[in-house]
Amino acid sequence: MFFQSTFSTLAAALDARIISGVSMILFGASMVLAVGFKPLAEVHNTTHDTRHATGFPCH
């Protein structure tokens, strides 16, 4: 009984890690593709505004 519950707990944890990992890979790939097709000026302005919004000195 103990081993069965331990294995099911480990399997559930592994499933959650796999789902999280695949989700992050897909999210990262979609971000790279979304930014990759934008004109350079739009990407620059967006990152520049984001830096200012977070308080990061960029110039």
Image (tube, rainbow, N blue to C red):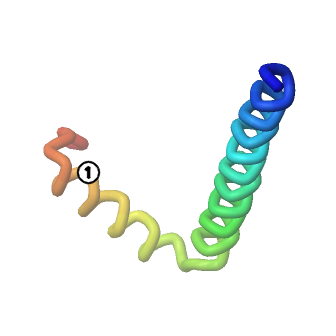
| Residue plotted at (77% across, 25% down) | 6
What percent of the width, then of the height, locates residue 41? 43, 73
Seen in the picture, residue 51 relative to 38 is either above or below; the reply is above
What percent of the width, then of the height, locates residue 38? 57, 78
Mark 1 burial class by Cα count in 10 Å: few <14, some 14-19, many 20+: few
Quadrant (top left, top right, bottom left, bottom right) of the C terminus: top left
| Residue plotted at (24% across, 62% down) | 49
Q: Nearer the viewer, residue 54 or 41?
A: 54
Outermost top residue: 2
Please identify the quarter of the rendering in which residue 28 is found.
Answer: bottom right
Q: Nearer the viewer, residue 13 or 45?
A: 13
| Residue plotted at (70% across, 37% down) | 13
Please identify the quarter of the rendering in which residue 57 is found.
Answer: top left
Q: Which residue is labeled 1 in the image?
A: 51
Seen in the picture, residue 37 relative to 1 is either above or below; the reply is below
Decide if residue 11 is on the left or right side of residue 27.
Answer: right
Decide if residue 8 is on the left or right side of residue 24.
Answer: right
Decide if residue 3 is on the left or right side of residue 26.
Answer: right
Outermost front residue: 1
Give amino acid for label 1: Arg
What percent of the width, then of the height, locates residue 48? 29, 58
**Label 1: element kind:** helix
What percent of the width, then of the height, locates residue 7? 83, 29
Quadrant (top left, top right, bottom left, bottom right) of the N terminus: top right
